[in-house]
């Protein structure tokens, strides 16, 4: 299940028809290299969402003004977890962490698919996490999750010691399980200090 309609035809807010249009319909002129958006044709609603470059696949669910603002704020809070010079987490690890916080599957956890209240929750959680990890800087997490060699049960995530790269996890759990195990190990290790 993809969890998202990549070619929406009906607005989730007002039920009006949705059409794939050039974003000059919104901005008065075409903006960006791939200016195509799904737009709600109800003038008073006008929820919209962009598309992946060179495709007609929606980037997320249609967003009204409140949702667009909440998504921007969620990205501003969340992206520093994996982006920028801090390198607090890998991108994959950051999205796994988010999925675990929200109780969803990693494949379906995306800011672009989230409504305004979920985005506000993401911003709150991420702001606290960034603060926590920045405080910990100086003694970094000793273990992490990463993709290991292929394994017969095709669950390639292992637990590795940072620095040495020594594999600590005995089997190849799913990414979710591996991330939970690493969080528990890191918690214990930090408790010893
Ligand atoms: Zn609408």
Image (cartoon, rainbow, N blue to C red):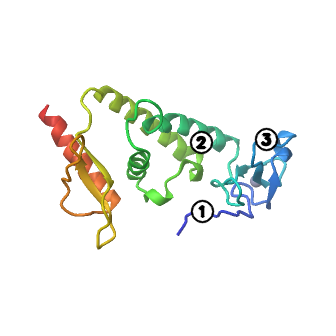
Residue 38 placement: quadrant: bottom right
Instruction: Identify the element where label 2 is drawn.
Output: helix
Furthest-left residue in view? Answer: 192
Q: Is residue 102 above or below residue 187?
A: below
Residue 192 placement: quadrant: top left
**Which residue is painted at 26% across and 33% down in the image?**
140
- Disc 2 versus disc 3: nearer the observer: 3
If you read the primary sequence from the N terminus, does the residue marked by circle 2 or circle 3 appear first? 3
Residue 90 horizontal/vertical position (percent): 40, 43
Residue at numbered disc 3:
31
If you read the primary sequence from the N terminus, does the residue marked by circle 2 or circle 1 appear first? 1
Seen from the viewer's position, the closer of residues 166 and 125 is 166
Residue 31 horizontal/vertical position (percent): 79, 41
Compute the Cα span from label 2 to label 1. 16 Å
Residue at numbered disc 2:
71
Q: Is residue 106 left or right of residue 144?
A: right
Seen from the viewer's position, the closer of residues 108 and 122 is 108
Label of residue 4 in the image = 1
**Which residue is painted at 71% across and 62% down in the image?**
8
């Amino acid at each position: 299940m993809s969890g998202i309609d990549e070619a929406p035809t009906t607005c989730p807010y007002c039920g009006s028809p949705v059409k794939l249009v050039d974003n000059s319909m919104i901005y008065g002129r075409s903006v960006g290299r791939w200016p195509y958006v799904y737009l709600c044709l109800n003038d008073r609603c006008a929820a919209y969402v962009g598309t992946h470059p060179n495709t007609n696949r929606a980037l997320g669910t249609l967003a009204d003004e409140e949702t667009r603002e909440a998504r921007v704020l969620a990205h501003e809070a969340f992206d520093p977890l994996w982006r920028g010079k801090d390198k607090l987490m890998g991108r994959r690890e950051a999205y796994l962490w988010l999925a675990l916080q929200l109780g969803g599957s990693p494949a379906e956890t995306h800011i672009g698919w989230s409504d305004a209240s979920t985005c506000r929750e993401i911003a709150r959680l991420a702001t606290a996490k960034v603060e926590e990890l920045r405080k910990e800087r100086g003694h970094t997490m000793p273990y992490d999750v990463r993709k290991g060699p292929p394994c017969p049960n095709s669950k390639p995530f292992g637990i590795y010691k940072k620095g040495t790269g020594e594999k600590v996890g005995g089997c190849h759990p799913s990414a979710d399980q591996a991330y939970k195990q690493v969080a528990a190990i890191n918690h214990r290790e930090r408790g010893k200090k």
